[in-house]
Image (cartoon, rainbow, N blue to C red):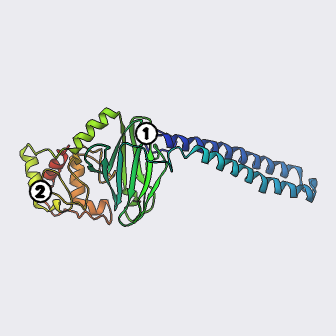
Amino acid sequence: MQSALNPAGLEAERIATLWWWMAGGTLVIWALVVALAVYAKRAGDDRYSEREARWLILGGGVILPTVVLTGLLIYGLWLLPALRGTEPPPGLRIEVVGERWWWRVRYLPEDGEPVVSANEIRLPVGEKVEFILSSPDVIHSFWIPSLGGKMDMIPGRVTRLVLEPRRVGRFRGACAEFCGASHAYMNFAAVVMEPAAFEAWLAGQAQPAAEPAEPLTRRGQTLFLANGCGACHTVRGTPADGVLGPDLTHVGGRLTLAAGLLPNDPAAFVRWIGHSDELKPEANMPAFGMLPAAELRAMAAYLESLR
Ligand code: CUA
């Protein structure tokens, strides 16, 4: 679900409230203008003096917008700063880096080691979480409409955003700033969980990758390493320790592949590894279409087993 009008977070609730007031007000003003137009048409040309017309323009064109917009500004300012511009709350912080075109994610628990992940964000319900946002090259914008407003990720700067999810569920996040050829393919799943389930999940993510247990997944791991995938990707617990691309230690357990582009199943892994250039134009991930289908399937099985 990606909708600012289906709020599941504190800031999104406030934004939705403001939106409904504005939509209602717009409707009232629109009805007023239409009614005036109909009335003027029926009444004919010589009904008003110039003096009355001037008052109508002054009242409807200057005074009314000034009063309405000032009121809206005051209401909006009063409504919104609940989370913005205040001291960051203690607790979980999450570093998110906008890459072309995926999301580098690092969980920084209050006590404990950082946990690296990608293209998916999990959050405990009812807790304020501070996001630390940046980008190495182009401007992206981090947005989970159901949880709150968007925040730009600007090269050379660090921006911050605090969100407080209030409802458990799966929501869709997206890049909300045009950032190049595959801007539209830069999405992620945001999963809000019960705090205990979140802690258990995070502890699992901190573990190294599972050793492949079957002949097919073992072969997949050998191929993964032999084809140089480890130059860009990390699979903790193996020699693969590249940092250019997403960390794949637990890639099989994620909800989507390629930053929200594909479902997470072996067939999608085969498509992605073989045709990444077609699926995500200008992405840095080279396509391995020259590999035999059986080898792609073995690698897909291995990656899928990394839960
Ligand atoms: Cu990143 Cu648009």
Task: Specify the quarter for ligand 1.
Answer: bottom left
Labels 2 and 1: the sequence-earlier one: 1
- Along the viewing direction, whichever of 231 and 215 lies nearer the viewer: 231
- 21 sits left or right of 212 in the view: right
Q: Is residue 42 above or below residue 8?
A: below
- 56 sits left or right of 124 in the view: right
| Number of numbered discs on residues | 2
Q: Residue 227: x and y, percent?
A: 13, 61
- 260 sits left or right of 23 in the view: left
Q: Amino acid at mark 2?
A: Pro
Q: Secondary structure at mark 2?
A: loop
Query: What residue do we see at 26% from left, 36% from top?
Result: 200
Task: Find the residue positioned furthest to the left.
Answer: 215
Label 2 CB less than 8 angstroms from ligand 1: no
Checking the image for residue 165, the label placed there is 1
Checking the image for residue 81, the label placed there is none
Q: Amino acid at mark 1?
A: Pro
Query: What residue do we see at 13% from left, 50% from top?
Result: 237
Checking the image for residue 239, the label placed there is 2
**The N terminus sits in image quarter:** top left
